[in-house]
Image (cartoon, helix red, strand yellow):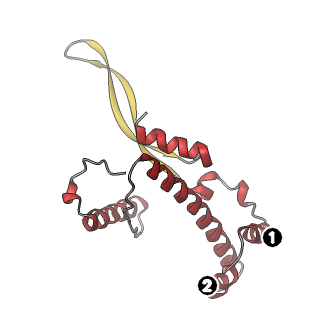
Amino acid sequence: MLDPGHAMFGRGVEKVVSVSAGIASSAFTHAAGRPAHFDSRIWIGAGVDDVVDYASWRQSDATRCAVNGWCYWTLRKAGASRQQATRRLEGTSTAAKHELLAGHGIDFDELPAWQRRGIGLWRADHDRSGRDPVRGVDVTATGRHVHVERELPVKDAYRALVRRLLDGS
């Protein structure tokens, strides 16, 4: 979420979108050692409630995409072509997709949470104790790190998490 005071690139939407996609692609490619390409989008909400609603919808959509991906690649590994796998999944209900996976020995609901819902990344503060050698006193410094959450909650608990992160509490 961009702070309302964010002024990078004069708040030019096209520039922010292209640069954010480029940074994500570059960082991932560098870390993974293999090429990757990310896209980016900007969504505009009127307030915290809109952001919470949008994040909740995106989590539901991520789960839908995960089921589809698992089904598609399960069919492909079973010998289906791209076209066959795609056609097989068109118009298929969520329940039927779960049954398809179960027929291949995969219980989607038992997969790790990050494979079903994705992961969450956010900046978090952490305190570090140390000693100031100049003054000879114990000190505590606050630093920031990226928190990686692979066990995201769902529904109301997820909405509460998003709200807490937005409120900074």
Which residue has dot 2 on it?
82
User: Which quarter of the figure is the C terminus placed in?
Assistant: top left
Q: Amino acid at mark 1?
A: Gly
Quarter of the figure with residue 22? bottom left
Q: Amino acid at mark 2?
A: Arg
Q: Disc 2 versus disc 1: distance between alpha carbons? A: 20 Å
Quarter of the figure with residue 71? bottom right
Which residue has dot 1 on it?
103
- Rate crowding at label 2 as few (under 14), some (14 to 19) or many (20 or more) other CA atoms within 10 Å: few
Of residues 32 and 55, the one nearer the viewer is 55
Q: Position of residue 65 (x, y in %)?
A: 59, 67
Please indicate, yes or no, whether residue 52 appears anywhere in the rendered image: yes
Q: Position of residue 25 (x, y in %)?
A: 37, 65
Q: State the residue at coordinates (68%, 79%).
A: 91
Q: State the residue at coordinates (28%, 64%).
A: 13
Q: Position of residue 9 (x, y in %)?
A: 20, 59
Q: Secondary structure at mark 1?
A: helix
| Identity of the residue furthest to the top in this view | 136
